[in-house]
């Protein structure tokens, strides 16, 4: 028999996860609006030429991806296989397309969690794919249960991220159906896989994504530490006797900035102001530097990059608790939660009412505007930083 509190929390998490997926009607409105956008100074993009190895192979049914994948593997130079990317190949697309709706919910939640992290200046190549595969693996194991739990599966995902540098993860395609291989089976090792740590890309069995973490010790350590803290929050949530706004809020609030002191140890205690911009309609956070002199200080750019992620996570957390508890999301409520998180999680102090010397955003060095992403028509939360 399940725990009623855990069931309520699981329902809250599912409700929140679904709120992150815009409706078809909303996406159509967004698409129509996008057609009116202009870029006065152009827009940067990368163009990467690619070779088509499949040569028109188009079998019908679920074997399409496997046939094309086999053709690519026969053509590629095995000694250079780790340099090939299959993220846009049909076999990679089909791998996710063939997963259940429950798995897609877990993957969305994992991606949302990752968006709240600042790991360091150097990116981990393929980390989003790695986390996606870990989420799929956790979901596949949960699918065997009579009653699936998003909360429990997300906890399993975090447990695996904590041991990401020790994971052995590989999927196999049997007659068009993807399955998680038993990595303890001796046959797995006879197939030529390493015996320590591997996360194999489904569309390229020669690409061990775990190798990309070798020279990113600090970033991987931060990722594991963040996962540990999130896992503790899950444990606390699962022990909660009743589901409240605060219980869900604490689950999604930004992770402690103390884990990356390199950026936050020298804040110089900037003065802050918080407000709202009802006219803001962008999907991504905006950062406006109004005093270029502050950028001359070493480490300031990295600090602001991390703050941008923190504030985005804070705004999402503020609305998450309201959504998960079937409460109306208002700009005033979200602002109050963000102010609390800035004090407690960013500055590491007790929350007190703010009394800025000036309420003119034009007088601040840097101004962030963060959208309430589940409803762009509500505008965004505006936060100003000013150094003395």
Image (cartoon, rainbow, N blue to C red):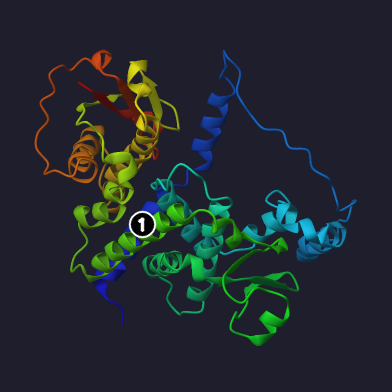
In the picture, measured across the screen, residue 212 lies left or right of residue 236, that is right
Q: Residue furthest right?
A: 55
Residue 358 sits in quarter: top left
Residue 160 sits in quarter: bottom left
In the picture, measured across the screen, residue 206 lies left or right of residue 223, that is right
Foreground pick, 200 / 19: 200
Foreground pick, 33 / 280: 280
Q: Position of residue 122 (x, y in %)?
A: 50, 44
Q: Position of residue 204 (x, y in %)?
A: 72, 61
In this rendering, the answer to whether 24 lies above or below 78 is above
In the picture, measured across the screen, residue 347 lies left or right of residue 56, that is left
Residue at image x 72%, y 52%?
A: 83
Q: Position of residue 16 (x, y in %)?
A: 36, 52
Q: Find disc 1 in the rendering and name its residue.
A: 226
Residue at image x 44%, y 66%?
A: 157
Residue at image x 28%, y 70%?
A: 6
Residue at image x 71%, y 51%?
A: 85
In this rendering, the answer to whether 377 lies above or below 147 is above
Q: Quadrant of the N terminus?
A: bottom left
Q: Quadrant of the C terminus?
A: top left
In this rendering, the answer to whether 226 lies above or below 168 is above
Is residue 190 visible in the rendered image? The answer is yes
Q: Position of residue 279 (x, y in %)?
A: 36, 21
Neighbours of disc 1 within 10 Å: few (<14), some (14-19), many (20+):
many
Secondary structure type for disc 1: helix
Q: Tell me how many marks there are.
A: 1
Is residue 379 visible in the rendered image? The answer is no
């Amino acid at each position: 028999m399940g725990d009623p509190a855990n069931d309520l929390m699981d329902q809250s998490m599912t409700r929140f996860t679904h709120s992150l997926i815009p409706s078809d009607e909303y996406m159509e409105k967004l698409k129509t609006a996008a057609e009116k956008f202009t870029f006065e100074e152009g827009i940067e993009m990368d163009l990467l030429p690619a070779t088509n190895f499949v040569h028109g192979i188009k079998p019908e049914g679920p074997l399409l991806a496997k046939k094309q994948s086999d053709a690519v593997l026969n053509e590629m130079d095995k000694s250079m296989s780790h340099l090939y990317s299959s993220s846009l190949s049909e076999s990679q697309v089909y791998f996710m397309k063939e997963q259940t709706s429950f798995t897609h919910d877990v993957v969305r939640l994992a991606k949302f969690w990752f968006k709240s992290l600042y790991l360091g200046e150097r990116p981990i190549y393929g980390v989003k794919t790695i986390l996606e595969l870990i989420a799929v693996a956790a979901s596949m194991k949960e699918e065997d249960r009579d009653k699936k739990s998003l909360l429990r599966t997300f906890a399993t995902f975090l447990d695996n991220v904590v041991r990401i540098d020790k994971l052995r993860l590989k999927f196999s395609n049997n007659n068009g159906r993807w399955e998680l291989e038993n990595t303890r089976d001796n046959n797995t090792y006879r197939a030529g896989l390493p015996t320590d740590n591997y996360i194999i890309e489904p569309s390229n069995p020669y690409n061990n994504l775990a190798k990309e973490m070798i020279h990113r010790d600090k970033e991987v350590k931060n990722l594991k530490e963040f996962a540990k803290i999130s896992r503790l929050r899950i444990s606390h949530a699962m022990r909660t006797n009743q589901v409240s706004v605060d219980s869900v809020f604490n689950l999604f609030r930004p992770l402690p900035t103390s884990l990356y002191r390199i950026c936050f140890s020298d804040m110089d205690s900037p003065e802050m102001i918080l407000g709202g911009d009802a006219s803001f309609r962008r999907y991504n956070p905006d950062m406006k530097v109004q005093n270029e002199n502050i950028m001359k200080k070493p480490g300031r750019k990295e600090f602001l990059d991390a703050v941008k992620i923190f504030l985005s996570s804070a705004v999402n957390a503020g609305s998450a608790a309201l959504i998960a508890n079937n409460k109306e999301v208002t700009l005033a409520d979200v602002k109050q939660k963000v102010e609390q998180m800035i004090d407690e999680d960013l500055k590491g102090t007790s929350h007190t009412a703010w009394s800025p010397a000036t309420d003119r955003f034009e007088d601040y060095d840097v101004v962030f505007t963060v959208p309430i992403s589940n409803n762009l028509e509500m505008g965004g939360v505006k936060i100003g930083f000013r150094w003395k």
